[in-house]
Image (spheres, grey):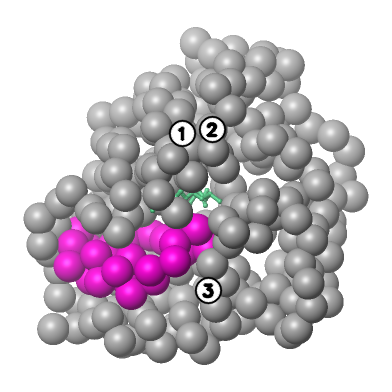
Amino acid sequence: MNSTEIHTQYSTGLSRHNIEQALLAAGKDLDQLRPADLGLLEDFHTMGRFATSQLVDLLGISSEHKVLDAGSGIGGTSRFVAEHRHCQVTAVDLTEEYCETARWLDRLVGLDDHISVRQADVTELPFTAAAFDVVFSQHVQMNVANKERLYREARRVLAPGGRLALWDITSGKDGELGYPLPWADRPERSFLVTSDRLRETVQATGFTIDHWNDLTDQAAGVMQMVLAQPANPLGLHAFVANFSEKAENLTAALTDGRLRVVQGIARAIS
Ligand SMILES: C[S@@+](CC[C@H](N)C(=O)[O-])C[C@H]1O[C@@H](n2cnc3c(N)ncnc32)[C@H](O)[C@@H]1O
């Protein structure tokens, strides 16, 4: 998707305002905000913080690592990594509204000295070769038709031996999908491939696979639990339009296997 299509999919003009209202409704003091106060706002992907923390643990990130969050949304993963691993993180997203919201939240929780946010396309990254040790790519490739270009860019900006961490939705067994989904209001905005195809594309662009794990059953269970929870002001619905319908469609498709979710760590080879 180009930047206009991405803007149409994700921008509402209200992300910052609605998040501010949600934080106040949850009784948070914006002058004393800590990263943990942001709760369920932070992870715009299946299995939320479980998924992010599992990837961070698998990667063994330390304070010396230079980390890129490629397709960072409002910046939850970059804040988690900066807070818990004390490293410098660069966050890139094509949705300007999300970049602005990410900068504001980074300042509010006092992590802006560890995180820089840039509006850019993950298939055309504005960084020199070998600039990073770790690249995160969580729930972004579903919007990207040219996955080869996406992973070639990730490979280019990684130092040899650097790692690409993936948390992604792939296609599963046959069957029509219900829309809207969290990344696509309409089928034309979704570019799904099978997990095998995704793995082959990553391998073909200069990576060897260290870890590849299908977590569909676990993710379906967690999503069912999340949907059964009472309403909480600090949910993704605060800034994602029609989020409950999107989450229900995703959960139904994960539950019967029309969609799958894969966790991967790939290592950059020369
Ligand atoms: C479902 S959200 C996931 C956000 C974040 N990775 C997370 O897991 O919380 C998808 C994000 O990918 C971004 N995105 C999609 N295509 C992109 C591209 N070509 N370049 C940069 N960002 C992109 C969107 O703007 C959106 O913020």
Residue 99 is covered by the magenta coloring: no
In the image, residue 243 above or below residue 161 = above
* Identity, as a three-letter code, of the amino acid under mark 3: Gln
Q: Secondary structure at mark 1?
A: helix
Of the image marks 1 and 2, the number of the one nearer the N terminus: 2
Q: Position of residue 155 (x, y in %)?
A: 23, 71
Q: Nearer the viewer, mark 3 or mark 1?
A: 1
Do labels 1 and 2 touch, CB within 8 Å?
A: yes
Which quarter of the figure has residue 115?
top left
* Quadrant of res 97: top left
Q: Earlier in the sequence, mark 3 or mark 2?
A: 2
Residues at circles 3 and 1 in contact by the CB criterion of under 8 Å: no
Residue topped by disc 3: 263
Tell me the element at label 2: loop
Residue in view at x 10 percent, y 55 percent: 128
- What is the span of residues highlighted in magenta in the rendered image? 132-158
x, y percent for residue 174: 75, 83
Question: Which labelled disc corresponds to residue 98?
Answer: 1
Residue located beneath label 2 in the image: 11
Q: Nearer the viewer, mark 3 or mark 2?
A: 2
Above/below status of 203 relative to 240: below
* Magenta stretch contains residue 147: yes
Q: Is mark 1 within 8 Å of ligand 1?
A: yes
Distance (Cα) linking label 3 and label 2: 27 Å
